[in-house]
Amino acid sequence: MDRAARSCIAWRKSSWSNGSSNCVEIAGLRPGIGIRDSKAPAGPVLVLAPERWMAFVEALKAGDHDLT
């Protein structure tokens, strides 16, 4: 994804980040859901198909990835 394309994307941080820069951001992209590190906005972007994103969100809600 080139720099010009990145500047047109509306990236969002989780409301749980409380203004911290140590989180991920997501954006709706044409091929799916984009995920990036908020500390490295020019870095790599992981793009998941919408159904894989929903499966990930459902797993989080179910506690499958709870690190506590």
Image: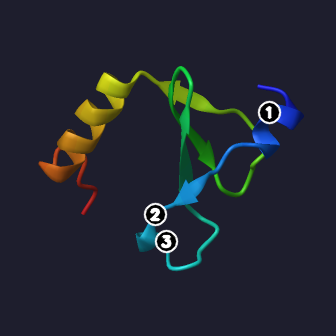
- The N terminus: image quadrant: top right
Q: Earlier in the sequence, mark 2 or mark 1?
A: 1
Q: Quadrant of residue 44?
A: top right
Q: Nearer the viewer, mark 2 or mark 1?
A: 1
Label 3, label 1: how far apart the Cα atoms are: 25 Å
Q: Quadrant of residue 34?
A: top right
Q: Amino acid at mark 3?
A: Ser
| Residue under label 3 | 17
Q: Which mark is residue 36?
A: none
- The percent coordinates of residue 42 (x first, y second) are 80, 42
- The percent coordinates of residue 40 (x first, y second) are 75, 50
Nearest to the observer: residue 62 or residue 48: 48
Disc 3 secondary structure class: helix
Query: From the viewer's perspective, is 16 left or right of 13?
Result: left
- The percent coordinates of residue 27 (x first, y second) are 55, 43
Q: Residues within 10 Å of mark 1 (few under 14, many from 20)?
A: few
Q: Residue at x 61, y 43 (%)?
A: 36
Is the Cβ of the residue at disc 3 closer than 8 Å to that at disc 2? yes
Q: Residue at x 81, y 45 (%)?
A: 7
Q: Amino acid at mark 2?
A: Ser
Nearest to the observer: residue 8 or residue 25: 8
Disc 1 secondary structure class: helix
Question: Can residue 42 be seen in this snapshot?
Answer: no
Label 2, label 1: how far apart the Cα atoms are: 22 Å
